[in-house]
Amino acid sequence: MSFPDIHRVVTGHDEHGNAIIVEDGPLKTVKDIEAIPGTRFHEVWSTESSPAFISRLQNDPTIGPVVLPPLKNGTRIRFVDIPPDTEEFLAHGKENMKDAFSNIGDEGASTVKGNSPHPLMHRTESVDYGIVIEGEMTLIVDKGEALLKPGSVVIQNGTNHAWANRSGKMCRMLFVLVDGKYEGELEKDLA
């Protein structure tokens, strides 16, 4: 199953402060994650700070390397197409995860170990909103899991997790990532 291309509209301001359409078309950056065949990142936008800097001239922040987490004090929005888990991936995927996460700019995010419940176990110091658009996904955490269907929303609070596609069909999710900071005791527990 192939999903339609993402269509992005970017607004801005002209020299008189009037709202204008700056861009109306396909995304500039779509990346296949080679170490996880069938996985595709669709980079929509990102910000570098909070509050976000708004100017007349907006450069496209998605041009350049794909990076998993948001920038410090920033945000990131992307669609991710996730293929069904295969027996091969479940049996041998753990061997490729350092490369997979390195390929998206965050090798340290992978937390997979020999006894991990899924090869994609990882953690980022961010609050991530994950919304299932099409298909089904299972969220796996250290002590539990939840089945997600279209319209399901996950608020992932910097937890160790994986996305398992047990449905046999492609899944498309939308993610909004917000930079975070672990607090005191939790930061010590995770060190």
Image (cartoon, helix red, strand yellow):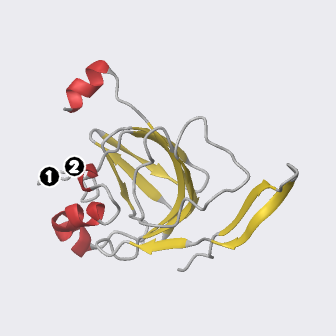
- In the figure, 109 relative to 184: above or below? below
Q: Quadrant of residue 86?
A: bottom left
- In the figure, 127 relative to 17: above or below? above
Q: Which residue is mark 2?
A: 111
| Mark 1 residue element | loop
Q: Amino acid at mark 2?
A: Thr
Q: Position of residue 182 (x, y in %)?
A: 34, 29
Q: Position of residue 50 (x, y in %)?
A: 56, 36
Residue at 28 percent across and 50 percent down: it is 109
Q: Which residue is mark 1?
A: 113
- Mark 2 touches mark 1? (CB < 8 Å): yes
Q: Quadrant of residue 106?
A: bottom left
Task: Decide which of 84, 72 is in the foreground and name it.
Answer: 72
Say whether residue 30 is left or right of residue 67. right
Say whether residue 107 is left or right of residue 156. left
Viewer can see residue 175: no
Residue at 69 percent across and 56 percent down: it is 57
Residue at 24 percent across and 50 percent down: it is 108
Residue at the far top: name it: 185
Q: Tell me the distance, in whole angstroms, between the alpha carbons under discs 2 and 1.
A: 6 Å
Residue at the far bottom: name it: 1
